């Protein structure tokens, strides 16, 4: 299935580009015979493994511990929180039968696990000393979606969900800040993805949450991809599920809760789309399925070729000792063919090994991002690789940031918003009456005017206030907020 | 929920021991409100992570690559292979509804994934050069079981399933041998579990397989726990699912298949049961949730205690650099209380850090298995730990092997089989007519006579032939096989 050549304009034909590269690079197979479910191939799995590990490490350093809850949730739990069930019910797969027997209580296949975790939290929390609870699980979840696209929206997709409970509102709010920092660190610093983190408007909070904060990555087609979100649940679920503790005065109190969901699938979609180019994928070094490909250049002489292959194998073992994932391509194809193939698959560093390299005890290294090539003596390899891994990240980050900055624009009118979204494929920054519930009508009007434009909310990591006389671009009333508007996936 | 004290005789009251320790050590919580589904707590999760990694590393070194298939399987796929569906149908959870809609085609929640993988293999295999396919997935599977016990039998449990396809029967048979070697290496060499690996009798093969080979660990109550199995599927599934390729003469051939299932849950049950003692769990170093616990011994002076805690933190960081998972217990409980608590939870190495240790730049180390204690200068720590980790494994392995050898006995009659199984809580080695289909009646008779005794099969790693005039202990006909008989979980 994997194709060996690729050349599609990401900018001009993004949908085609995306729908070609995810199969050409052999990340997924969409021919599984249940609509909306895909097979994850090894090339994606190695990268997912690294992505999960990045977040798991951060979450554990932040005091979270791993758990695994059942994939099934009793209908009764699920229906307990009214907003939550209303939000999720249309998307739930229901298990109604076991063997030949009808189940007396249908089971939801988890679309998200609040209602699984929190009934147990009510058992785990008795006194203040049982708090905080900070647990996460790495798993797939299931949603009965009607339009699907691998890594963007699927009937089964990969994520992490962290569910926390605290004795005070302050701790819960602090946790939200920490979640946002974790997201920022991994998404931006390690993966090089530029993004905006906003508090979602009141009408766009997670079902059952008081406040929702989310990261949006701007995709090449101008739509934003929500890659992670964190929710201040307040005490709503705690009251529904009786998560109660005695405080130091012996008074019964409900816990304050948060949940955090790094969307591992969505992050893959962002990595593919933001860093890729017309030649294919470009993985940041940290999450590349193979970080190095060693391509042998035949000398046309069996004895020499054997030496070259041995040299390549030694090189791979040396890289393994440095915890670098390397593959050898010793197939009979031409070097040019092999170069194209591994470029398309996004391997950040290519090492060429031929007669010359063996003689010089060196290796020729080519970067996927800049195409720069250099011959490096083996003695200098470790330093060179560490520096190059960093340089590739900086380059990808700079390119992505430049593109992002070009497409993030101020708008003074609805018309300008529409133009920025549709012509510039960008995000519009504008003045808006309010992100409280009263602003909902203006948001709907803006969406109708500008082809589904969504008010994504107000920035979280930077306080922005409209100027004193600023007006809402929709209703013309005084603007209380500077909001970001974009089309969404 | 976690208890701080534990003292139950594993030998005398195994069921009580097991049913107490898995909760006391906080491995699982069985109060989730769907019967047969449990919540996996962090103490189990850290160990599962290490267990998965051990097998994944071996499988990848053997040429397997990770994939993730959908958790749902269309009813039609599932019903294609007649024996397979007959074997699994009573255990399948069926998804029949999405949102408010009835699904036109019910979906099985995977009980095992042959019928998910192989329909795709038919697409992935066209020519001989597409073979072999060697893929595995780490996942949970679902079975509608009626009697459940955490880690032994559940409605959702953890495992790995590897599915391979080859161009020839020989390669498939070789793969079975390699699977068996992987099992032996991890289960016995790394985890210290003594076991027998047998070819299952004809009447006890996996539904759809030609031959089944499986590992049995003898549990303290005398029942065997099948912790892994590998199946020579032959061409049955390949014919059902059209996994066909053109060989080098251009002839269409069906692939030869194998599948291998390390039962991660079952292996945890074996680790808990075989290595634990009356005081609680004992984890082998390689898969311990925490490999070291650092217990602070207060000096009764705030300034000194601060120094002790700092020293403990430095020690933990030093261990982290050695990739050793360590936790600090600096709670206000007495040292004796803390020692008991971490012994119960099975941490293989305890480090005590008090005033004395800080002054001497040393640490007092106690082994969970032998209770041996020694003061070790920090300079010598690395060497000491490497040696001690190895020594603990050897000790656990030796204890387990001694117990196993005592309970593996020869039987010359049905009565002796019954006695070995019931009084000695052992495995009986005996002479049997045949493990071919004709032996089924004798096996049933033996089961009826000896309280459910099961013929587990003939040894795989050692050829054993009955003596010339040996008779089947049931029918008295000439014995073709030396079989192992045990009660099973």
Image (cartoon, coloured by chain):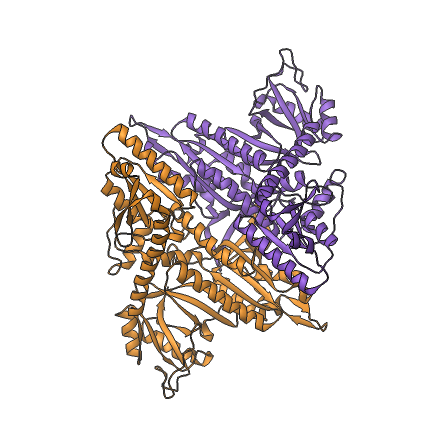
Chain colours: A orange, B purple
Image location of residue A204, percent across then percent down: 45, 71
Q: Is residue A436 visible?
A: yes
Residue at (66, 15) in percent of width and height:
B471
The quadrant of the rendering that contains the N terminus of chain B is bottom right
Image location of residue B482, percent across then percent down: 62, 20
Left or right? Give the position of B416 relative to A257. Answer: right
Image location of residue B216, percent across then percent down: 61, 33
Seen from the viewer's position, the closer of residues A207 and A329 is A329
Q: Residue furthest top?
A: B469
Image location of residue B463, percent across then percent down: 56, 20
The quadrant of the rendering that contains the C terminus of chain B is top right
Seen from the viewer's position, the closer of residues A229 and A354 is A354
Q: Quadrant of residue B202?
A: top right
Is the residue A333 above or below the residue A70 in the image? above
Is the residue A304 above or below the residue A411 in the image? above
Q: Quadrant of residue A157?
A: bottom left
Q: Is residue B266 visible?
A: no
Seen from the viewer's position, the closer of residues A31 and B483 is B483
């Amino acid at each position: 299935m994997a194709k060996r050549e690729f050349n599609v304009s990401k900018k001009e034909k993004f949908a085609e580009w995306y729908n070609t590269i995810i199969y050409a690079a052999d990340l997924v197979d969409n021919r599984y015979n249940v609509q909306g479910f895909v097979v994850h191939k090894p090339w994606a799995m190695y990268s997912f493994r690294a992505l999960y590990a990045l977040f798991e490490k951060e979450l554990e350093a932040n005091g979270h511990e791993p758990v695994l809850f059942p994939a099934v949730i009793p209908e009764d739990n699920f229906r307990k929180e009214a907003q939550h069930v209303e939000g999720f019910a249309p998307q739930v797969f229901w298990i109604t039968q076991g063997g030949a027997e009808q189940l007396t209580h249908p089971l939801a296949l988890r679309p998200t696990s609040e209602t699984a975790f929190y009934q147990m939290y009510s058992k785990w929390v008795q006194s203040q000393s049982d708090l905080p609870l900070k647990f996460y699980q790495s798993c797939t979840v299931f949603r009965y979606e009607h339009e699907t696209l691998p890594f963007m929206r699927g009937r089964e997709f990969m994520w992490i969900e962290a569910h926390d409970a605290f004795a005070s509102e302050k701790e819960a709010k602090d946790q939200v800040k920490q979640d946002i920092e974790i997201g920022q660190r991994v998404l931006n610093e390690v993966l090089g993805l530029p993004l905006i983190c906003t508090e979602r408007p009141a009408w766009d909070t997670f079902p059952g949450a008081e406040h929702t904060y989310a990261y949006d990555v701007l995709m090449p087609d101008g739509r934003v991809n929500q890659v992670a979100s964190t929710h201040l649940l307040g005490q709503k679920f705690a009251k529904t599920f009786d998560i109660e503790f005695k405080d130091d005065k012996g008074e019964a109190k409900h816990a304050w809760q948060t949940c955090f969901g790094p969307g591992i699938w969505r992050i893959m979609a962002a990595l593919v789309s933001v860093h890729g180019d017309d030649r294919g994928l470009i993985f940041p070094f940290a999450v590349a399925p193979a970080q190095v490909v060693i391509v042998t250049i035949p000398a046309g002489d069996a004895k020499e070729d054997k030496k070259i292959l041995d040299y390549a194998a030694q090189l791979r073992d040396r890289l393994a000792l440095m915890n670098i994932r390397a593959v050898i391509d010793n197939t009979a194809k031409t070097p040019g063919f092999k170069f194209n193939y591994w470029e398309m698959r996004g391997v950040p560093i290519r090492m060429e090994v031929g007669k010359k390299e063996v003689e010089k005890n060196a290796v020729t290294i080519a970067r996927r991002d800049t195409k720069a090539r250099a011959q490096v003596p083996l003695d200098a390899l470790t330093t060179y690789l560490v520096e190059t891994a960093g340089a590739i990240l900086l380059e990808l980050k700079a390119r992505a940031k430049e593109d992002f900055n070009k497409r993030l624009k101020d708008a003074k009118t609805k018309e300008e918003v529409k133009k920025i979204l549709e012509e510039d494929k960008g995000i519009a920054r504008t003045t808006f009456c309010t992100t409280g519930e009263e602003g909902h009508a203006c948001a709907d009007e803006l969406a109708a005017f500008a082809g589904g434009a969504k008010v994504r909310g107000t920035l979280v990591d930077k306080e922005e206030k409209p100027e004193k006389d600023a007006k809402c671009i929709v209703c013309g009333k005084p603007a209380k907020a500077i909001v970001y508007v974009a089309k969404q996936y």
